[in-house]
């Protein structure tokens, strides 16, 4: 994988994903390894994303790499009108790898074609966020012991949520059964359902968030975002329907775990946090290990 | 005897005749093939009667034979176009255009948030459906359908 970029999770073969997850497992056991000693990593955040940036910077620091970059484009040359093309050209001569987040869709693919060093997409608008998918896969495999033949429930905004789309596409490699729970307005788009049908995978759609979750191996919660609704009354109606509460977990499998890309608002009641099935905070920590693994893979170090 | 005048318009000795172009897309075809920069003798006819298309256009290009990959670029705007390859005033070969698997630099991505609509990036698409043309953007991965197709 040396000198390759990671723009979309599909850029990695199944074997490469497994290798990356295995390496992330090594970093979990021994997080501080000075493998990027003497390397300079650029973190270009054209739009702010504190969580993702800190996760990457923590990963780079634990590997002993040095960081250059910006956390907000208002403090960079972009505010002077520089094109993405020129910024990337310039930065690729200052660094050994570029991590970038940009609000424009496709910007990361474009950057990877301009840059002379590998590019990691840390989110390009509503398009892709592959390191999130990788950490989701890591969390699923770690908690379930396997990626094969699982039953995954996705809840909330399945229409616009890019994390659920990427995770669904990635998990389709391992014979997953999907259950989609969403309000009518935020259902999983047809193109994704068609994708599963073509692969011969089973999926079920529900509008009620009920006892059916007893079958789940993983419940993947997402935020229902107010700005997605044209009618504020519709939002008020659904916002409290897709809330996970501790009382709902009684009949779920002991091995079931709850994931959420965070930040959450009210879709997981705080009374779930102390339940051992709540995994979303560990999930965030796994992000550091998987990003360490991805950095090393693309640098050709491990 | 002097040659009748219409002969130079209606027939070419060697070259290519592109027939069954939808009349409204004639100038798009000219643009895609770059005919406006050709030195060859070219004749156009447009708003001609056609049972199939209603109004069709036709282009005759003297002394020019296209590669398939080049001519297939017009498939987005003239999916029913037919080519007659002329040698010595005779039709020696007939061809139809085929929608290619990849399309570079002809269509515009319909996603207003796509990088190709922000910076000078040559658009690139994978053709995911040929019948009702659907193009998947190489950059933003969104689908542009026939109804939303705009030629750059």
Image: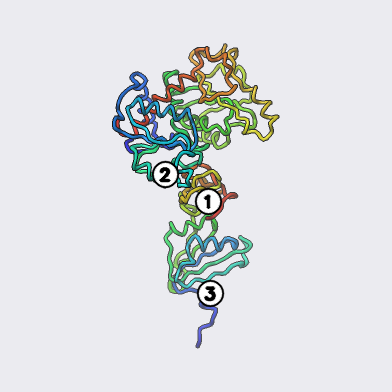
Mark 1 vs mark 3: give the one in front.
1
The structure residue drawn at horizontal position 45% and vertical position 33%, both measured from the top left corner, is A130
Outermost residue, bottom side = B1
The structure residue drawn at horizontal position 47% and vertical position 33%, both measured from the top left corner, is A129
- Same chain for mark 2 and mark 3? The answer is no
Left or right side of A92 for A153: right
Q: Which mark is residue B108?
A: 1
Q: Quadrant of the N terminus of chain A?
A: top left
**Counting other residues with Cα less than 10 Å from the Cα at mark 2, is it few (<14), some (14-19), or many (20 or more)?**
some
Count of residue discs: 3
**Counting other residues with Cα less than 10 Å from the Cα at mark 3, is it few (<14), some (14-19), or many (20 or more)?**
few
For the question of whether residue B20 can be seen, the reply is no
For the question of whether residue A171 can be seen, the reply is yes
Mark 2 vs mark 1: give the one in front.
2
Q: Which mark is residue A87?
A: 2
User: What is the distance, in whole Å, between disc 2 and disc 3 at their CAs?
Assistant: 55 Å
Task: Tell which circle, 1 or 3, labels the residue nearer the N-terminal end.
Answer: 3
Q: Is residue A299 above or below residue B41?
A: above
Q: Position of residue A211 (x, y in %)?
A: 60, 17
Q: SS at mark 3? A: helix
């Amino acid at each position: 994988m040396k000198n390759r970029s990671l723009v979309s999770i599909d850029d990695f073969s199944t074997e490469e994903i497994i290798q990356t997850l295995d390496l992330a497992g090594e970093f979990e056991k021994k997080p501080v390894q000075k493998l990027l000693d003497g390397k300079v990593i650029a973190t270009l955040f054209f739009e702010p994303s504190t969580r993702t940036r800190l996760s990457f910077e923590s990963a780079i620091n634990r590997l002993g790499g040095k960081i250059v970059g910006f956390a907000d484009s208002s403090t960079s040359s972009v505010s002077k009108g520089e094109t993405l093309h020129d910024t990337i050209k310039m930065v690729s001569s200052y660094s050994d790898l570029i991590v970038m987040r940009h609000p424009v869709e496709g910007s990361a693919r474009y950057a990877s074609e301009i840059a002379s060093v590998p590019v990691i997409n840390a989110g390009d608008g509503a398009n892709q966020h592959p390191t999130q998918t990788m950490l989701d896969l890591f969390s699923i495999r770690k908690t379930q012991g396997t990626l094969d033949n699982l039953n995954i429930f996705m809840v909330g905004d399945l229409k616009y949520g890019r994390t659920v789309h990427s995770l669904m596409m990635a998990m389709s490699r391992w014979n997953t059964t999907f259950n989609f729970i969403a309000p009518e307005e935020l259902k999983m788009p047809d193109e994704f359902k068609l994708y599963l049908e073509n692969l011969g995978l089973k999926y079920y759609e529900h509008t009620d968030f009920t006892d059916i979750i007893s079958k789940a191996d993983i419940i993947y919660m997402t935020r229902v975002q107010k700005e997605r609704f044209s009618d504020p009354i519709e939002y008020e109606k659904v916002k409290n329907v897709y809330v996970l509460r501790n009382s709902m977990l009684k009949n779920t499998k002991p091995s079931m775990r709850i994931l959420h890309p965070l930040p959450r608002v009210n879709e997981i009641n705080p009374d779930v946090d102390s339940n051992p099935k709540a995994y979303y905070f560990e999930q965030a920590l796994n992000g550091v290990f998987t990003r360490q693994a991805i950095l090393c893979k693309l640098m050709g170090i491990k | 005897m002097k040659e009748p005048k219409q002969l130079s318009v209606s027939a070419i000795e060697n070259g290519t005749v592109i027939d069954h172009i939808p009349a409204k897309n004639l100038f798009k075809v000219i643009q895609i093939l770059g005919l406006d920069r050709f030195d060859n003798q070219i004749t156009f006819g447009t708003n001609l009667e056609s049972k199939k298309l209603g109004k069709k256009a036709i282009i005759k290009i003297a002394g020019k034979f296209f590669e398939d990959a080049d001519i297939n670029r017009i498939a987005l705007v003239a999916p029913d176009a037919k080519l007659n390859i002329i040698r010595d005033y005779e039709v020696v070969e007939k061809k139809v255009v085929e929608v290619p698997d990849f399309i570079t630099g002809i269509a515009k991505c319909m996603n207003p948030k796509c990088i190709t609509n922000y910076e000078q990036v040559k658009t690139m698409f994978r053709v995911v459906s040929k019948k009702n043309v659907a193009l998947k953007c190489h950059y933003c991965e969104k689908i542009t359908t026939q109804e939303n197709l705009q030629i750059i």
